[in-house]
Image (cartoon, helix red, strand yellow):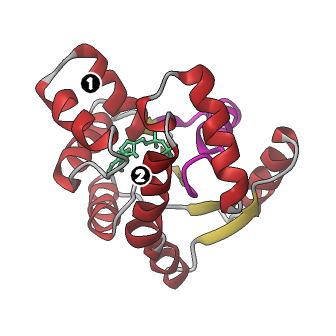
Amino acid sequence: MLNIIIFGPPGAGKGTQSEKLIAKYSLQHISTGDLLRAERNAGTPLGNTANEYISKGELVPDDVVIGMVRNFMAAHPDATGFIFDGFPRTTPQAEALDNMLLEFNTSISTVLGLEVEEDELVKRLVLRGQTSGRVDDQDEDTIRNRFREYQNKTLPLQSFYQQQAKYQSVKGIGEIDEIFASLCSCIDGLKHG
Ligand code: ADP
């Protein structure tokens, strides 16, 4: 199986690049942000709870997102690979993911980290907020809070995966197709087996 984590701060382009990667490598896309927004739009209890965190730019509790990912994976037993987008975002999530993949007799193939500096990210998120209608893209305070959460809770995962020799960093600024080509060469350079 090819199991990829697309990693990076809010606004780095994880969703955009995931769409292209799933098409090229026939992967199942797991975006915890998308799953949470779908729950919220459906008005489920989980979605309502999650929205309280999302609207403040805070991370949703680990057990909620881990449960969602577990359900998604269980619902796709024939998948030939997964792309994890916006997950894991904390060390407990990363440890849970390693265990879930073990149950599938597989593991993370690589972690592709999109590198974009904060000024560019804020610009992108404000712009996205004008059309996406996403509650967490609307004001700069919420956006800044998401960066704080990223710095404090998510960035430590970079060394978690570096220690496993799985982290590859890719420049996330430039043409979408150019960035996509860099991601593909990271994947194509992996030894399968
Ligand atoms: P972005 O990467 O632009 O912040 P996402 O759609 O990935 O967008 O996430 C939006 C929000 O959903 C996050 O700010 C957080 O509140 C919640 N969320 C998504 N994934 C997770 C996760 N793995 N753990 C905790 N909260 C999450």
46 or 82, nearer to the observer:
46
Residue 87 - label: 2
Occupied quadrant, residue 32: top left
**Which amino acid lies under the numbered mark 2 shown in the image of this protein?**
Phe
The disc, 2 or 1, on the residue closer to the chain's N-terminal end is: 1
Question: Is the shortest distance between ligand 1 and the CB of mark 2 under 8 Å?
Answer: yes
The spot of residue 3 in percent (x, y) is: 51, 52
- The amino acid sitting under disc 1 is Glu
Which residue has dot 1 on it?
39
Neighbours of disc 1 within 10 Å: few (<14), some (14-19), many (20+): some
Relative to residue 126, is residue 42 depicted above or below? above
Tag 2 near tag 1, CB within 8 Å: no
Q: Residue 17, labelled with which disc?
A: none
187 or 80: nearer the eye?
A: 187
Q: Is residue 129 toward the left or the right of residue 17 in the image?
A: left
Helix, strand or loop under label 2: loop
Res. 64 image quadrant: top left
Q: Residue at x 57, y 72 (%)?
A: 166
Give the foreground label among 2 and 1.
Answer: 1
Point out residue 168 in the picture as x, y percentages from the top left corner. Answer: 67, 69
Image-quadrant location for residue 190: bottom right
Q: Is residue 125 magenta?
A: no
Q: Which of the four quarters of the rendered structure image does ligand 1 lie in?
A: top left
Determine if residue 35 is in view: yes
Identified at 56% across, 56% down, the residue is 9
The residue range painted magenta reads 7-29
Spot occupied by residue 35 in the image (x, y as percentages of width and height): 35, 31
Q: Is residue 13 magenta?
A: yes
Q: Residues within 10 Å of mark 2 (few under 14, many from 20)?
A: many
Closer to us: 156 or 4: 156
Q: Left of 50 or right of it: where is 76? A: right
